[in-house]
């Protein structure tokens, strides 16, 4: 155990970030079959073949494949696909840098800052249905991924959720529907939706600031804590694990040697997201609380 | 000089992914405003910020004949093309779908005059969450028949 901890502490941050990225690609395969085969092959080779991890050809290949996936899938590719291709490009370019760890640390930090910056811009300014709470009020009711969370935190029964879902998903084109009480199930649920709205805006804005501010000791530590907290909280409910793993890879890239505890926290969060994906723990809690 | 050029080279390499992200995101914001691209797509990081994503849009397609408008169900083979259309309803995609649907048989007699395609978007009342749909994009394409 001590040897493992020592190796984690001593590892270059770029190498650690690269390994996590390849692991994420294996755990969350991406792309259509023709592209997926090559991505998986390169990711496996990078992890298994000793000197392959730092080869520009490996990362250039991944950058090309993930980038061409974005182009060929246009306009269907989601944020994860774009960010993955930028990150693979970043790692490719770091292979040519004199100080690879420093190079990738800078890019990891700025990519995180920009991702959350644009995300905040959308939520705060460009999407009127977020800031008024409508987004979470509808999503918590109609998206099945949130059902357990809505039952536990929102205090709703399955019947209430189904009635609300029916009311919200009625379909009349060009006509007018009457409001139905079931679509607004309870005061507690409304408060939950507003709290999530405020929380998401606050933490994403804070992440933008923390990662785009200077690299002083304080802001660096704050950014790491916020990012870990964001991943632990968000991906416990929204199972978008590929994106979460990518953020952790970027986070650990700007976490130099000697920051053992922070590195371990990032690694633990990586494992935690895997746990969230594989174990229906929320459903177990809801069942155990006897709410079914 | 070598140090300076090395510094410039490193800065250029550093800038590349950052510039790519920023330019793509700004382009995506422009597309959402001017050509109805869904904010969930396009690399602008608008996911989980709005209810306007491709799967919450829907389409209706009609074959028009003199005095008759019949709705047609697009075949399963067009499912991916329809998903792209709903996510980004450009004129080119609407025309492509219209041409594909012109060949879908209907029980009506006589040549079809036109194909009408409507892309609908759903919004929700702030207080009651009552859904209301509105047309986002529409195309009526005349079908040219061979003499």
Image (tube, rainbow, N blue to C red):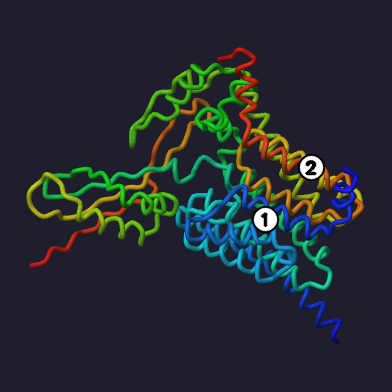
Report the residue marked by disc 1: A22
Residue A91 picture quarter:
bottom right
Q: Secondary structure at mark 1?
A: helix
| In this view, A167 is above or below A101 | above
| In this view, B51 is above or below A150 | below
- Label 2: chain? A
Residue located 86% across and 49% down the image: A219
Quick one: label 2 or label 1, which is nearer the N terminus? 1
In the image shown, does B110 or A290 lie closer to the viewer?
A290
Viewer-nearest of labels 2 and 1?
1
Tell whether label 1 touches label 2 (CB within 8 Å): no
Report the residue marked by disc 2: A226
- Residue B119's spot in the image, x, y percent? 36, 47
- Label 1: chain? A
Label 2 – label 1 distance at C-alpha: 24 Å
Q: Quadrant of the C terminus of chain A?
A: top right
């Amino acid at each position: 155990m001590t040897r493992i901890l020592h190796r984690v502490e001593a590892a270059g941050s770029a190498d650690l970030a690269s390994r996590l990225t390849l692991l994420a690609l294996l755990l969350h395969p991406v792309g259509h079959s023709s592209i997926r085969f090559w991505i998986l092959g390169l990711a496996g080779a990078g992890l298994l073949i000793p000197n392959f991890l730092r080869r520009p050809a490996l990362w250039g290949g991944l950058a090309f494949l993930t980038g061409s996936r974005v182009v060929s899938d246009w306009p269907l590719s989601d944020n994860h696909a774009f960010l993955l291709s930028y990150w693979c490009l970043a790692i490719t370019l770091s292979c040519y840098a004199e100080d690879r760890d420093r190079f990738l640390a800078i890019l990891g930090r700025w990519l995180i800052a920009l991702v959350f910056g644009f995300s905040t811009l959308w939520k705060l300014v460009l999407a009127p249905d977020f800031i008024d709470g409508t987004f979470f009020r509808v999503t918590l009711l109609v998206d099945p991924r949130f059902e357990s969370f809505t039952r536990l935190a929102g205090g709703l029964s399955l019947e209430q959720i189904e009635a609300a879902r029916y009311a919200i998903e009625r379909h009349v084109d060009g006509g007018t529907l009457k409001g139905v009480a079931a679509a607004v199930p309870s005061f507690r649920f409304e408060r939950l939706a507003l709290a999530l709205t405020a929380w998401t805006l606050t933490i994403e804005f804070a992440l933008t600031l923390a990662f785009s501010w200077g690299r002083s000791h304080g802001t660096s530590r704050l950014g790491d804590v916020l990012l870990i907290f964001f991943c632990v909280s968000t991906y416990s409910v929204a199972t978008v694990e590929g994106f979460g793993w990518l953020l952790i890879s970027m986070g650990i890239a700007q976490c130099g040697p000697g920051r053992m505890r922070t590195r371990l926290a990032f690694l633990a969060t990586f494992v935690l997201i895997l746990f969230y994906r594989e174990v229906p723990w929320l459903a177990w809690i809801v069942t155990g609380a006897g709410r079914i | 000089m070598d140090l300076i050029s090395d510094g410039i080279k490193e800065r250029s390499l550093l800038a590349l992914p950052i510039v790519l992200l920023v330019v793509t995101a700004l382009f995506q914001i422009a597309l959402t405003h001017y050509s109805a691209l869904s904010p969930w797509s396009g690399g602008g990081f608008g996911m989980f910020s709005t209810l306007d994503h491709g799967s919450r849009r829907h389409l209706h397609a009609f074959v028009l004949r003199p005095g008759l408008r019949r709705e047609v169900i697009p075949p399963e083979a067009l499912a991916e093309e329809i998903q792209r259309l709903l996510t980004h309803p450009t004129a080119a995609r609407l025309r492509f779908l219209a041409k594909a649907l012109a060949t879908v048989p209907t029980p009506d007699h006589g040549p079809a005059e036109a194909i009408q395609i409507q892309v609908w978007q759903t919004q929700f009342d702030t207080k009651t969450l009552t859904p209301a749909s509105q047309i986002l994009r529409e195309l009526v394409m005349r079908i040219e028949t061979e003499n």
